[in-house]
Image (spheres, helix red, strand yellow):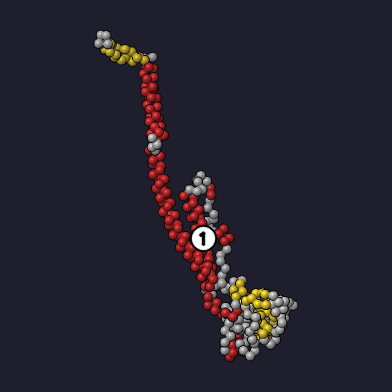
Amino acid sequence: MAKRKTYKLNHETLLYEIKEVSKRTVFAKATLVFLASVALAALYFFIYTVVLGYDSPKTVIMKKTNARWETRLELMNTRLDAYEEILGGLESRNGDVYRSIFGMDNMPAGVFGNTPTGPIDESLLENVNPNSPLARTARRLDAMTRQVFLQTKSYDEVATLSKRAGDMASCRPAIPPFLPDKSKYRISSSFGYRSDPVYGGREFHTGQDFPMKSGTPIYATGDGVVESVNFRFNGYGNEVVIDHGFGYKTRYAHLSIISITEGMKLKRGDCIGQSGNSGKSTGPHLHYEVIYRDSRVNPMNFMDLEMSVDEYKAMVNLRSSQTKELLSQPFSLRSR
């Protein structure tokens, strides 16, 4: 192996003398110097980071980047707080006001599963701490997406029904179910708790009783469709239930004659039968109920017993003449 010439001072002669050094020796020295430098650098890094507790430059950069993202997430969550408050107000207004006006039930929670985006893809958060700000924000966004979709669908239903708002006035029970001639009826067994007239004991009376002569004509108190016609020997006896839509239903019980059938469309003032004494009854009377959103309500709040008798007769006569005119038409025209 070729040798490298170097000059070395001779301390005895004070002269520089030529000394030959092999390249292997030079390489070994260079390697030793390099390893010593690496060791010193490692020692310096250990002292800087472990002993003194300082962050490495790379860690400093990552922390700064992480801090910027955390600030953005905090800002996003602040906005989400405001949006959730607004959305909560819309949801409350929709359920307590708009849907209530039209007698609509609240949207079922199962609709959440029909959101167009579907549930959040948990695989996207597989390597993320579930309690981290990122995971919590992602789940909040997912929940808000579902809630927005639900409210949008609910408002669409309200908008569809609001187009029929003009029909609500004629469908809502609003008149007495009989001619309001005070000489022909009286009021007994009001809505609320009472003593059972047959078995005794305290019970809740779900309607209003009007004692009257058997055979008194009974009329529909609002437009609707006959939901059920039942002929019983006990309980309500012969009864009719009319679905008026918009959350309203009415029941007419203890009838002697029923002159309508299930599925018939009725208008306010149409005769549905005659009062009687059928079922669990101590005398001829009409038991009348108003049901709103599946709950019994006081029927006296849905009628004006001071209504003019002549006005009531005019309404009944008008409906009778309209019905006769309709029945005189060909069947093809009636179904239009």
Q: Amino acid at mark 1?
A: Gln
Quadrant showing the C terminus: bottom right
Q: Is residue 42 left or right of residue 192?
A: left
Q: Is residue 9 above or below residue 92?
A: above
Q: For the image shown, how many numbered marks are present on the structure?
A: 1
Residue nearest the observer in this picture, 201 or 207: 201
* Residue at image location 38% in from the left, 27% down from the top: 40
For label 1, the SS is helix
Q: Is residue 50 visible?
A: yes
Q: Is residue 6 left or right of residue 294?
A: left
Q: Is residue 238 visible?
A: no
Tell me residue 232's x, y (percent): 73, 77
Image quarter for residue 106?
bottom right
Q: Is residue 243 above or below residue 139?
A: below
Tell me residue 267's x, y (percent): 60, 81
Residue at the extreme right: 233
* Residue at image location 70% in from the left, 79% down from the top: 197
* Residue at image location 45% in from the left, 58% down from the top: 81
Tell me residue 5's x, y (percent): 31, 14
Image quarter for residue 62?
top left
Residue that label 1 marks: 147
Q: Is residue 54 left or right of residue 223?
A: left
Residue nearest the observer in this picture, 327 or 154: 154
Residue at the extreme left: 14
Crowding at mark 1 (Cα within 10 Å: few <14, some 14-19, many 20+): many
Q: Is residue 29 above or below residue 156?
A: above
* Residue at image location 71% in from the left, 80% down from the top: 281
Quadrant showing the N terminus: top left
